Amino acid sequence: MSRHVCSVDDSRMNPLTSNNRALAERDLRHLWHPCTQMHDHLSIPMVPIVRGEGAWLIDADGRRYLDGISSWWTNLFGHANPRIGAALKAQLDTLEHVIFAGFTHEPAIELAEQLVRITPPGLDRVFLADNGSAAIEVALKMSFHYWLNQGHGEKTRFIALSGSYHGETLGALSVSDVALYRKTYAPLLLTPILAPSPDAYERETGESPEQFASRRLGELRSLLERHAHETSAVIVEPLVQCAGGMYHPSYLTGLRALCDEFNVHFIADEIAVGFGRTGTLFACEQAGVSPDFMCLSKGLTGGFLPLSAVLTTTQVYEAFYAEYNAGKAFLHSHSYTGNPLACRAALATLQIFRDEPVLERNRALAAHLARRLAPLRDHPNVAEVRQTGMIAAVELVQNQDTRQPFPADERRGLRVYLHGLEHGALLRPLGNVVYFMPPYVVTEAEIDHLVDVAIAGIQHAVRG
């Protein structure tokens, strides 16, 4: 079935040996991991990683795992990248951190200049924060506060897409629509207005992705006709809903026009899809649009340090610019705002984009990934293989014709994950969706390994 699946010895079937076991036991005495039912680790091995090399992670016993998900979508140019590491080492000798209220430093200034230069036109102001969820919080608050400063305090609501995911702090979770994360905390959250997703997976037979996007825009128009008076912004993940699906760029073009027509903001959450993931530096470029707010994080520092940025327009900035006693200032802060080390890592990451043909290489790698995944389109338990640039996903179902999903409690995706670990690959499916988002330094041979392990893992997962 697969030409490239590695042979497996008995020791690989149990990663908890020797040094791995010792570290895992220490971990489980005190640590509480994210997105994890800790009880699972009674049977599922914790994998202690001691170093990384390019697209690979190495555990305490020397076993290697190809990082097929870029360590939660953050790593662009490989683990222990020497250029980014050298930039950090140099910065450590001069300034590690300084308060960013009333003070500044060159790494943050230069980073802001470069982000303004490379992002879509009109995004001329940069607000720095710590991580992706924090960036979403900033954009939501800034949008609401803008309208308040303009005398429209009634605009307190947000429109989000069904199936969207924007983070897990309360504000970010408020504009997300993944029940697994949202349901428990619903009493604490704002209530968004949900627009039907343009995810092309949901289109009718014979309907093109572009036609479906147009239909969904019509439904968004209807929502705005009823709710624009109370809406601050529409927030979307451009082109790829990373917990959902993928859609046609024309939806973004139409969204921009609708936001202008109904006088609401357009927030583009490019935290996961920015910096080359979709085939262009930013996903919004493929629709030729500029949002009112663009949220960036994850790949911004090449996966080295937490940092996020919210870019917005001069018009938004000027709505806050007044005498102090006017009470219009944006009083939002993070202790590590503008951290010089994180800014320096981001600058080194952007330098790699300038010095190397990253996007061209990514397009070639994406084409190879598409070729290798193509046979899965005929698999009886695969409803769809979808891809946008260096993001690909395989939707597992009980039956290809009916698209009936597997019951969530069967955890078929977990079987793929465990099979991957046994065969030297880090695959972490989202439910029953097996996705690929490798670092940009991955080779075609490594993509072959990743896909072959995934195909074998899917075969294992769909058995009764």
Image (cartoon, rainbow, N blue to C red):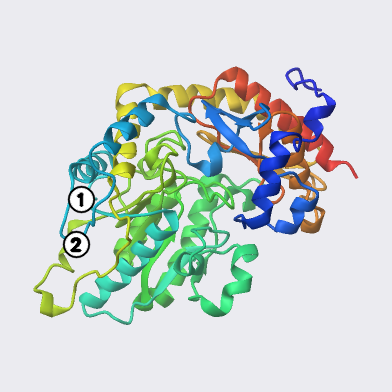
Q: What is the secondary structure assignment of the residue under circle 2? A: helix
| Quarter of the view holding residue 351 | top left
Q: Nearer the viewer, residue 392 or 440?
A: 440
Q: Is residue 131 left or right of residue 436?
A: left
Mark toward the start of the polypeptide (2 vs 1): 1
Number of the label disc, if any, that sits on residue 124: 1
Crowding at mark 2 (Cα within 10 Å: few <14, some 14-19, many 20+): some
Specify whether 81 is left or right of 246. left
Q: Secondary structure at mark 1?
A: loop
Q: Is residue 242 above or below residue 292?
A: above
Q: Up-down: is 190 above or below 399?
A: below
In percent of the image, x 52 and y 62: which residue is there? 168
How far apart in space, not on screen, are marks 2 and 1 (Cα)? 9 Å
Q: Are marks 2 and 1 in contact (CB under 8 Å)?
A: yes
Residue 114 point in image, percent of width and height: 23, 39
- Left or right of 65? Residue 293 is left
Query: Looking at this view, is 66 or 18 the one in front?
Result: 18
Q: Is residue 257 above or below residue 148?
A: above
Residue 433 visible in the displayed image? no
Give the residue type that dot 2 points to. Tyr
Residue 435's disc is none
Mark 1, other Cα within 10 Å: few <14 / some 14–19 / many ≥20: some
Residue for badge 2: 317
Q: Position of residue 424 (x, y in %)?
A: 69, 28
> 167 or 33: nearer the eye?
33
Q: Dividing the image into 4 quarters, which one contains the N terminus? A: top right
Amino acid carrying mark 1 in the image: Asp
Determine if residue 236 is in view: yes
Observer-nearest residue: 14 or 391?
Answer: 14
370 displayed left or right of 79: right
